[in-house]
Image (tube, helix red, strand yellow):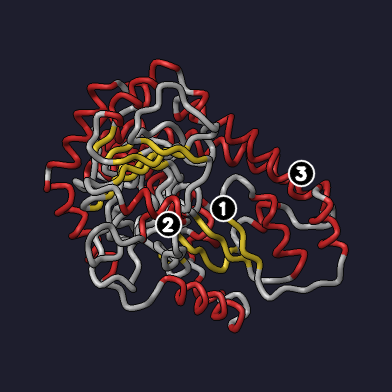
Amino acid sequence: MSPFEMIPLLNMVGEMTTRRILEHPNVQHLLQSNQNFDAIILEQFNNDGLKVLAHHYKAPLILFSSIGASSWINPLVGNPSPPSYIPEPLLAYTSDMTFWQRLVSFVFVVLSELNRQLIFFPAQNRIMKEFFPDAPDLSVLLYNTSLVFVNSHESINQPVPHVPSMVDVGGYHINPPKQLPEDLKEFMDNATEGVVYFSMGSTVKPSQMPDSMRNDILKALGKLKQKVLWKWDEDTIPDKPDNIKLSKWFPQQDILGINIGEDIQWITKMIRKHFIRYINKLIETQNCLSLMVDCSVQSKLCILAFLFLQYPCSGDQKLNAAVAVANGNGLSLSFSEVAEEKLSDALREVINNHRYSENVKRRSKLMHDRPVNPKDLIVFWTEFVIRHQGAPHLRVAALDIPWYRYLLLDVIAFLAVSSFLFRCSFLLHS
């Protein structure tokens, strides 16, 4: 879908999600109980009506953004987000935009914000008022966020401004690998040339792809010397090559964390995209939206392989693919371009060209060179907000002034009028 077509779709999804959550029997039971909470943590994704929970429980509001800092989160905490170099999640642009890309970015940001203010937020407010008629207007609750955890890190994401109430926690969800099931361990141990892990994630059913695309992928993967693990949503697949093992579910982090023929543990994080990840002998294809890549600090040496080959379909996938290509970490093919020869060429490129692995090693070192474990950051800052009763001292002044003052439109108007009057006065006296 076009990014512009996604705007009304996200409106609909957001309204449906917020309503279904608030009317769910378990949520209603919780709301009617006498439980109290020290803080409310919500993911920020088209569910703004749920911010009323912080008001209901009289607790600080902490938001979590799975895609990092973006226009979906920045306005809520007054974080600067100029469209000239900070790309929109739904656009396939990096910070280095051409003139036309900056034009599209600007138009998209303006339309998106108009949509939020005139259509989406009023709809969320109406839903919220149905369940909490005595709550203040959503416009009051929107900007009372105490803290935002952003699932990003400058070693992988493009560096962007962060106000004090934003904390990078990219890599927080990585856990040490567990023992693989015996059949899977045997399959991996016998893969002397390496393993390709192929997955379309949890939101796409691979069995529904066109037959021609499925056959092209089968042929391309079947030509590899490596063995292939394919997360397939059915028990069988027609014409399956002998080097492919199917399963409806794989322990993904454990697969990426095992010892693959060398005395090195490899652990990587999931990314929300279709891609192939190559770690010396391990290659993975995955769709997991935009969780960042990371390595376990327990590894003696860890190469973080990230987005080597990606098929961006929707959402922020195109942005992640563009960033991966810009960072030299991977290749990107559009879903409509998937064909046997193109896929085979891309696989050969990422496996045989050491440029990708060298870039990944450099990014891995940057990701590990940080003073505090991201899990510890989450714990510290959550308790910090609770200890300091919402930590209002982190709130930037931009949230307390009208938008026209923030954009200096009154100053620009004054200078324009003054210049015009001065010009008129000059012409009259001359």
Q: Amino acid at mark 1?
A: Gln
**Residue toward you, 114 or 351:** 351
Image coordinates for residue 333, horizontal then vertical, percent: 29, 30
Which residue corresponds to the image point at 84% horizontal and 55% vertical from the top-left?
Answer: 28
Image coordinates for residue 318, horizontal then vertical, percent: 37, 36
Decide which of tag 3 and tag 2 comes sooner along the chain.
Answer: 3
User: Does 198 sit left or right of 41 as displayed?
Assistant: left
Which residue corresponds to the image point at 37% horizontal and 48% vertical from the top-left?
Answer: 187
Any mark on residue 127, and which?
3
Q: Estimate the spatial distance between the alpha carbons at disc 1 and disc 2, rounded to whole Å.
A: 25 Å
Q: Amino acid at mark 3?
A: Ile
Question: Residue 331 occupies which quadrant of the picture?
Answer: top left
Decide which of tag 1 and tag 2 comes sooner along the chain.
Answer: 1
Image coordinates for residue 163, horizontal then vertical, percent: 42, 65
The residue mark sitting in front, 3 or 1, is 1
Any mark on residue 143, and which?
none
> Is residue 129 shown above or below 220?
below
Q: Secondary structure at mark 1?
A: loop
Q: Estimate the spatial distance between the alpha carbons at disc 3 and disc 1, rounded to whole Å.
A: 17 Å
> Is residue 70 shown above or below 203?
below
Q: Are marks 1 and 2 in contact (CB under 8 Å)?
A: no
Residue 430 visible in the current orientation: no
The residue mark sitting in front, 1 or 2, is 2
Image coordinates for residue 233, horizontal then vertical, percent: 54, 34
Q: Estimate the spatial distance between the alpha carbons at disc 3 and disc 2, rounded to whole Å.
A: 38 Å
User: Does 37 sit left or right of 266 as displayed?
Assistant: right
Any mark on residue 44, and which?
1
Decide which of tag 3 and tag 1 comes sooner along the chain.
Answer: 1
- Circle 2 sits on which residue? 253
